[in-house]
Amino acid sequence: MACNGPGCNSNCYKDEEAEVASCAQSSERTKSGDAEANPIANTLCIKCKVNEAISGYGGIDDGRFCADCFRNNLFGKFRFAVTSNAMITPTDKVLVAFSGGPSSRVALQFVHDMQHRALRNFDASRDRSLPVFGVGVVFVDESSVSPIHSNELEKAVKDISSIVASLTPPTKELHVVPIEAVYSSESSDRRDKLIKLVKAVSDSTGKEDILLYLRMLALQKVASEFGYNRLVLGSCISRIARHIISATVKGQGYSLPSDVQYVDARWEVPVVLPLRDCFAQEINMLCQLDGLKTLVLSTSPHSGINSLVSSFVQLLQEENPSRESIIVRTAGKLIPFHFNRIPEIVDGKTPLATQRHQKRYNLKSNVSVSSESFCYLCNSPLDKSETVDLSNLENHRSSDVFGTSYCSSCRFQILPRDPTSLEQFYTLLPQSVVARSQQVNNRNLSVLREQIQDCLLSDSEDET
Amino acid sequence: MDETGAKPKRSGARLCCTCNQRRAALKRPKTLEQICRECFYDVFEEEIHQVIVTNQLFKPGERVALGASGGKDSTVLAYVLSKLNKKHNYGLDLFLLSVDEGITGYRDDSLETVKRNEIQYGLPLKIISYKDLYGWTMDEIVKVIGLKNNCTFCGVFRRQALDRGAAFLKVDKLVTGHNADDIAETVLLNILRGDIARLSRCTSITTGEDGPIPRCKPFKYTYEKEIVMYAYFKRLDYFSTECIYSPNAYRGFAREFIKDLERIRPRAILDIIKSGENFRISTTTKMPEQGTCERCGYISSQKWCKACVLLEGLNRGLPKLGIGKGRISVNDSEDRNGSDRGKSIASKQCGTLDF
């Protein structure tokens, strides 16, 4: 329990022995950060009642805490999200998606702080029963589809490498992957294929969204290739609030709750959002206070639904600093899906401590919806009315079936309208999307098969 | 963007894409198809007919009151509904029901429009006034409380007035002119306000089925722009002045946003409604319990209904009673439009009868 003492002074000695920024920061840094952030601050921190509060960054807690308590509060929100949802357990290997932006920078920092602390506990403990979870970092290079100059990219990768290198001990592996890695490595023209795929999408919102899905595929690919079992994203309240409104506008009300939970295990490697309770403004403030280096890469100019939503939510947030959190809380009251929790592992190999950990925290989702079918493109769960009748599935060619299991949003804003371009679009999709669709179909078929098992005369699939 | 790149060509060479015979006269706001007037009337009316049929809004022989303010929505509704009633033999007895809030220079004029509609469409009209019902006109209320929160009074009183008027007419149903834009806006506002109870019911086409008089919205999927277009081409007689008590009526920011969305993607309005319909709300979420007002017997989730609380305040000289209580007033702008109970659409001019 660090950082809860009055003014955090009791814990500040730790910084002298640890070079890295841990939760408890040195008071010298605090004061300088304080002065920088708000020279006219004249209110005391409501928590420690010793230091001056910092303000001016926005969010609900603006102007309530001093720099130390602010930092602890933010880290506390992160840690609470992690522990109460069993996001990271000692045996895990965690991959942090780092874009260079403030949110993922803070996610990376906090994960590191946590890992660093776990390492110290490990070193200090006698029986060493709790191993230290592993951390890796991934950066997706999107230069093939965004206007990033090669020099800019080179510099970005260099910066990111130095950031990751500075976060030791323990050392973290950095993976830099091009987004075209969603295609199998054998295909030599994968960059062209990706460009063609994105070009085939005429709607500008659809173009942005398909990149989002491809990015997730790329992240998943790295995660599973290198044996990670968690993917950490830096999505904060502000981002999630925007997603809620955009998804509503795109008619995705059914699948919306699946995207706004702490855990999203519909992917091969479960995705976790430990910054779900932090405001973007708080995150920016922390970056500023602690001098966390972030980078901004050039992107295509945003137009369309997403940017419209973004400016709308920003307007609302300025008018009321808790608006984003109200939006997220409202969506939080919608029923989540069965995959919105970390799946429990019940094999004998899991250390007892991990099992206990999971038992303690994973029991809270009591209501959830199970959905069997997902959009092949964005992987959002499909409402029953949107799915095809699977009973005559075998009469279709695979591409026909393929064309029917998309959510209405993808059908409208991503898939080309005319049949020829649609056919071509399918050929451009990464193998993993195709594989997923086949996998889903097979799973559905086997569910059907199970139901009729007693009436089948042969065990093999072909003869039935 | 899905604007299909079709600029409205004024050359006149283009034919209606539905009938392929007449010259296209307009670009349909909902689909951006270029069609002629006749086809527009047909598709506009047919869509409403389909909504009525598929949702079984009415049964033959029912008495139905139309909330009529004299504004575009209710005027088009009265026109279209009486037309469809004849054309498809719904067998409905239609009535116009207006509320006279007692706003000089606004409602008296709009009521003249409704009175003309009464003759034009041959529908019996009942006007129910705040003065008769509550003993106060809006003019008198505004004198007491000023221009702040006046919309709260008006909104709460109107809701009850419509129900009382409907009961007077002994109708089985009350239809209102809420259009697709209104409903999309309500969905968004309920998300923004965190009002999960309303979010779960705001997209229902029929509400209050457990109450004495169910209400329904045949325009649920009808775009505001198309209603305006219909009224314009048909030269319908409607009243379009803003209420004098919400001067330069604050157009809700949600409404602005929806208009922006519609510009780049017309189907966004329908998509928002679809999202609203598909939201699955946990049954464990606390919902307000429906009861009746101990004082007047009107439906209420509290001991007294909101109208009685407000009225009590007025009569006791404490007009602030019941305002902003138990609810954090989200912002001033929303207040102007009456963000209080019973009111769910922020951008509507307060004088319309569509609540």
Image: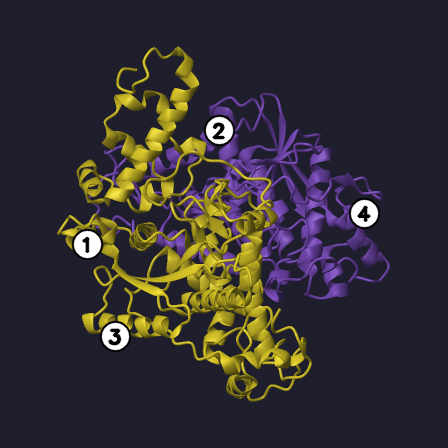
Image x and y of residue A237, in percent: 51, 61
Of badges 4 and 2, nearer the viewer stands 4
Where disc 4 sits, the SS reads: loop
Q: Which residue is mark 4?
A: B304
Q: Where is residue B69 drawn, in percent x and y?
A: 60, 46
Query: Tag 1: residue type?
Result: Ile
Chain B drawn in what color?
purple
In the image, residue A444 sits, relative to residue A8, either above or below, namely above
Left or right position of B101 against A75: right
Q: Residues within 10 Å of mark 1 (few under 14, many from 20)?
A: some
As shown in the figure, which amino acid type bears the numbered disc 4? Trp
Task: Name the residue carrying label 1.
Answer: A195
| Kind of residue at disc 3 | Lys
Please state the total of marks drawn on the protein image: 4
Residue under numbered circle 2: B84
Residue B244 makes an appearance in the image: no
Say if labels 3 and 2 share a chain.
no
- Specify which label sits upstream in the sequence, 1 or 3: 3
Residue situated furthest left in the rendering:
A188
Q: Position of residue B298 (x, y in %)?
A: 77, 40
Which chain letter goes with mark 4?
Answer: B
Kindly state the secondary structure of the residue where label 1 is placed: helix
Mark 1 → mark 3, Cα distance in angstroms = 23 Å
Q: Is residue A321 left or right of residue A425?
A: right
Chain coloured yellow: A
